[in-house]
Amino acid sequence: MATLNRERTGAADASQTLPAAASRFPLGNLVRFRRDPILFLRRLAAEHGDVVSFAIASAELVLVNDPELIHRVTVTDHRKYYKSRGLERAKRLLGEGLLTSEGEVHLQHRRMLQPAFHRQRIAGYADSMVESAHRAASRWKSGDIIDITAELQRLTLAIVGRTLFDEDIESEAPEIGQALGESMDLFHFLTLPFAEKLDKLPIPPVKRFHKAKARLDQTVYRLIAERRAEGVDHGDFLSMVISAQDEENPAARLTDEEVRDQVMTIFLAGHETTATALIWTLYLLTLNSDVENRLTRELQEVLDGHRPVLDDVDKLPWTRAVLTESMRLYPPAWMIGRRAIVDTDLGGFSVPRDTIILMSPSVTQVDGRFFPDPMRFAPARWIADNGSGQNGDALAGTATDLPKMAYYPFGGGPRICIGERFAWMEMILVLAVLMQERRFTLVPGQQIKSRPILTQRPSGAIRMRVEAR
């Protein structure tokens, strides 16, 4: 079977049809995909190479694991592809936000929202991030056993409230967190085959989804109404969205529903994905004492006992490397889907219109061709070796010269995450505060697994013992 793994088969010619993975029984791929989607995709890539087609129920999909072709789909030829089925279904929760919208709507709204994420504007959020992290750490007393999953979701929710909405919504955190969790869980149900028909039935999963969505809408629409009534720019994301103009059409303004969709999207991205990245990072640190020790040394040397500030973000290369490596192994956005809107060619293979293209950071980012010893948690691979051997790790610098799109936890091209700079600032500052003030130990006897749905969140609680430093 021909594949795009050129080391094995040589370059493909334009006449080739897509190589296909057979299934032992009609719904076999669906069962295996839903049981463990990341394992399923990794096995496909390992067994069939960089481009392989497969069926899930009646849908035809293609997994792409070649960075050059991923770049082509997301960047070079992005106009030939739209969002795939999964994010089409995500409109049930996110509406026409940046994550789900297409065409002129997406371009116009991205232009309107871009100023909200300019460096100068998000720089003002740093102090709120640090203060929120300090308040969370202060709640955890020496000897406490906490569910780090719930605690970090509560923390990032507080940061979203204070930085994006200029509101203290931490008191609503349990309700909002539960609604977000139920929405994410039920998203898995809504991507089933025939979900469009199931969604119209008054069955318990559908009723729970609508109840959870209504709870989230209650908070978002309340914040919108309060801000419009005040008519005051609070310097936050919500104020920016409400007053946003399109430079190509200055008269354009977002309706309440459009504001709601953008706010809900940023709400999810700013809360869910950041929390997930921090959860996996702390989990990995508890398993790697040498990495943790080097992190605490860097914090001591750079911060010298004071809380981090914005200017410290670029002075903490090991802290950044730890987060970078954590998102390599556990990317929150674990899969990107696109649908071909025209017949096209991909690396010499014919791709018919309406084919779904899947690209998974969880597959590409553990590919041994790009990352030696790929399953090892080794932040040193992101630190360039200056030749002195001081890094003390054979993998030092191995990932500092990668092909484009070999590492893409924030996506790529025109649809790259608009809040990437915000997320990096938040993650570095929060991790610095937590690791400066507290020590975390994993409670033994737990089975920690990921549950990839819309994001790659843990399957349940992760219990850790907390000690003061």
Image (cartoon, grey):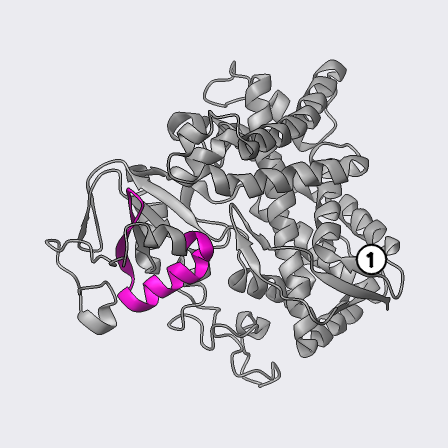
Depth order, front residue of 344/316: 344
Asked whether, in this view, residue 129 is left or right of residue 421, the answer is right
Tell me the amino acid under the disc marked 1.
Arg
Is residue 381 or residue 29 the one in the foreground? 29
Membership of 54 in magenta stretch: yes
Looking at the image, which residue is at 58% across and 86% down?
Answer: 389
Residue 347 horizontal/vertical position (percent): 22, 55
Residue identified by numbered label 1: 307
Q: Determine whether, in the image, residue 108 is placed left or right of residue 299.
A: left
Q: In percent of the image, x 18 and y 70: which residue is there?
A: 9
Q: State the image coordinates of residue 149 (x, y, percent, origin top left).
A: 69, 54
Q: Answer yes or no: is residue 186 visible.
A: yes
The count of marks equals: 1
Look at the image and say whether residue 34 sits in the magenta stretch: yes
For the residue pair 145 and 135, the one nearer the viewer reads as 145
Helix, strand or loop at disc 1? Answer: loop
Residue 39 lies in quadrant: bottom left
Seen at 30% across and 55% down, the residue is: 69
Which one is in front, 218 or 333?
218
Mark 1: few, some, or many residues within 10 Å (few <14, many ≥20)? some
Does 74 sit left or right of 246 as displayed?
left
The span picked out in magenta is 33-61
Question: Residue 342's image quarter?
Answer: top left
Rendering coords of residue 89 (x, y %): 45, 34
Res 407 visible: no
Rendered-image quadrant of the N terminus: bottom left
Q: Is residue 346 above or below residue 224?
A: below
Q: Is the C terminus in the top left, top right, bottom left or bottom right quadrant? A: bottom right
445 above or below 139? below
